[in-house]
Image: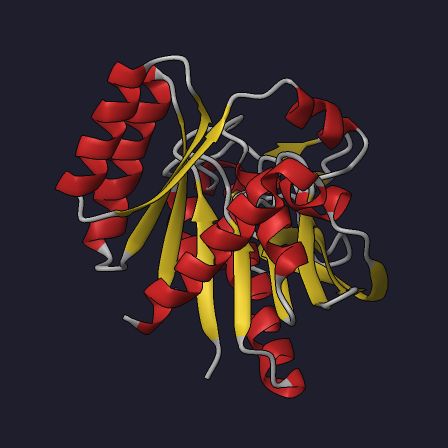
Amino acid sequence: MTRQIAILSGKGGAGKTSVTASLIKMMDSVVAVDADVNASNLPILLPHFPRSTAPYFGMDIASVDDQLCTGCGACLSACRFDAISQESDGRITIDSDCEGCAACAFTCPVKAISMIDRKGGDWYVSTIKNGYLVHADLIPGEDNSGKLITKVRNEAAAVAKQQDISYIVIDGPPGTSCQAISSITGTDLVLAVVEESLSGFSDYCRLAELIEKFSIPHCVLINKAGFSPELEDKIIAAARKFHGTLLGSIPFDAEIPEALQDLQSLSDMDKYKRTMQNILDELKASLTH
Ligand code: SF4
Ligand code: SF4
């Protein structure tokens, strides 16, 4: 049976992707997923070899058949998004504000408007040294990132099944938006990477509330720790309140961002190898509870 672990932080900059890459690198066999489709960073930290690429079609867009259009203008008033214009020569054009609602297509008396696929990005399957990486790039400004996250997660599940791989590890997007929801639904465990800061604390509380709503067990890893014992205590108390299992903490260490610049993650650093192995062991143990 394939088990899915999602790794999230309530905010950006908490070190989530570095932790995720470290854990993935230490696993025997894994399908890694980068669910941060707006800013995919996991592929930067995981050496990978592309195997396949496919376009992603997020939503439909209206398209006008100039041969059929009579220039009556009925579609202009039907569009609530001001995406339709009529040129001086009477020609109808549709711009990128089109939300794909199809109201114009229903309104057009001569059926000159049809709804066609609009490319929203690309998704990729690559090999990594111990498994596979599935990630995607959403075209800037495109919507429907939740649908693309579902797409990469479904593809990852198919790869795991085909290759008989027991773990899928998902690097989720920062925050608690609908993309975070798309990243955690149906997972077996969430690891919350919590920066030891005031905003890290409040963002964790929001994330923990979200995780609780989905009745998913979660673990907590405090990152960039060591500056404020009071804040660390607050995070630990919050983890207890939200039934999170505390896995430990990683100190603030200027060598970590330096290592990241060389594309090294925590598991590549001798002084953090054991810590990361313990965290991985505890995560796996949490899956069996
Ligand atoms: S599909 Fe909807 S948003 Fe797009 S042009 Fe037609 S009415 Fe406007
Ligand atoms: S409603 Fe149809 S026929 Fe009328 S202007 Fe729009 S596309 Fe052309």
Q: Which of 236 and 82 is in front in this view?
A: 236
- Give x and y (percent) for residue 266: 64, 39
Name the residue rendered at 76%, 42% in the picture: 44
Q: Quadrant of residue 166?
A: bottom right
Q: Which of 73 and 7 is in front in this view?
A: 7
Say whether residue 29 is visible: yes
- Give x and y (percent) for residue 102: 50, 54
**From the viewer's perspective, is 180 left or right of 255?**
left
Q: Nearer the viewer, residue 241 or 71?
A: 241
Name the residue rendered at 57%, 56% in the picture: 148
Q: Which of 133 and 225 is in front in this view?
A: 225
**From the viewer's perspective, is 3 left or right of 145?**
left
- Give x and y (percent) for residue 98: 57, 41
Please state the total of marks drawn on the protein image. 0
- Give x and y (percent) for residue 254: 64, 18
The chosen color scheme is secondary structure
Asked if 245 appears above or below 3 in the picture, the reply is above
Asked if 211 appears above or below 262 in the picture, the reply is below
Name the residue rendered at 31%, 33% in the picture: 204
Q: In which quarter of the image is residue 259?
A: top right
Quadrant (top left/top right/bottom left/bottom right) for the C terminus: bottom left
Residue found at the far top of this picture: 227
Say whether residue 119 is visible: no
